[in-house]
Amino acid sequence: MIQILDELAGLRAQVARWKREGLRVGFVPTMGNLHAGHFSLVSLARRHADRVVASVFVNPTQFGPNEDFGRYPRTPERDAQGLEQAGCDALWLPTVETMYPYGAANAVSMHVPGVTDVLEGEHRPGHFDGVATVVSRLFNQVQPDAAVFGRKDYQQLAVIRYLVRDLAFPLELVAGETMREADGLAMSSRNQYLAPAERAVAPEIHRTLLAMRAQVEQGAAVDAVEADAAARLRAAGFEVDYAALRRQDLSPLEGRAGGALVALVAARIGSTRLIDNLEFQSG
């Protein structure tokens, strides 16, 4: 049966007991409202560890003033049931007061340079500072041997890789593949915001990413691929933040692209903002 822990002393005591037994501890941080994509990360953590802790914490410091912190879905009881079925051993449910003892506005903040300044960083100022801050705190609280993050949030994963290496966190970072619905839409807690007509259009993001890959493989110029992708999404009814081609380290491209690449999209349909990406090799 899954343990539900809401006090830091209890969490640390449990993790310490496991480690005294020589067990390896895996960790899956989440903001809750869990779906099959999250549960696949739990299964992946199990392959890299003997015991798995998942956290559910809707982190206020990574939401901008006009974003959806207040309406972000919170389903802790259902999350606990799903995690137990997925083979998770413990659920860490910190309060805002536990995470930020001096309050979120007065918290020590983390900033990862460079990789946070582009794409999502341009459109959501401060977002990745909040991500880096809460992930650092969660790593300190749980002290895992392995931590698992999904590839759907591609830039977030890049930020955390930088963070782990730069601060020498003693853990293995594991990346899980993006889970998709049958029509290609990347699984996301925000998908439930979509009205039926919007949900019907949403898979166009994945189709656009596939088209971007195909155009690169046919030798199209980077600027033309990005412009065509943005136009395609707008024609489908999206408000586009970006449709971009980058090297997999997120450095920019010019001319015709080749090597290890990633196509990334962030676009809004109605009031819901969706992100997705596609990694591929070209040339």
Image: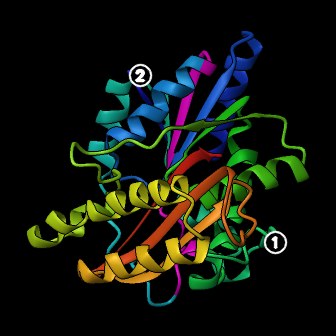
Which of the 4 image quadrants contains residue 26? top right
Q: Residue 84: within the magenta?
A: no
The residue lying toward the viewer, choosing from 235 and 6, is 235
Inspect the magenta stretch and tell me whether residue 59 lies in it: yes
| Kind of residue at disc 1 | Gly
First of labels 2, 1 by sequence position: 2
- Vertical relation: 186 (above or below) 119: above
> Which of 192 and 91 lies nearest the eye of the viewer?
192
For residue 104, above or below residue 274:
below
Please, what is the three-letter code of the amino acid marked with disc 2?
Gly
Give the residue displayed 35% in from the left and 55% down from the top. 188
Task: Identify the image's colour scheme: rainbow, by chain, secondary structure or one colour.
Answer: rainbow
Look at the numbered disc 2 and give the secondary structure of its residue: loop
| Relative horizontal placement of residue 66, taking residue 14 as reference (left or right) | left
Range of residues picked out in magenta? 48-64
Report the disc number at residue 87: 2
Residue 153, label in figure: none
Asked if residue 6 shows in the view, the reply is no
Residue 114: which disc?
1
* Image spot of residue 246 (x, y percent): 65, 63
Classify mark 1: helix, strand or loop.
loop
At x 29%, y 49%, the residue is 184
Residue 42: percent from left, percent from top: 47, 31
Point out residue 162 in the picture as x, y percentages from the top left corner. Answer: 80, 54
Q: Quadrant of residue 15?
A: top right
Which quarter of the figure is the N terminus placed in? top left
Total marks shown come to 2
Residue 33 in view, yes or no: yes
Q: Residue at x 66, y 70 (%)?
A: 128
Q: Residue furthest toward the left? A: 196
What is the CA distance from the residue labelled 2 to the residue labelled 1? 37 Å
Foreground residue, 89 or 223?
Answer: 223
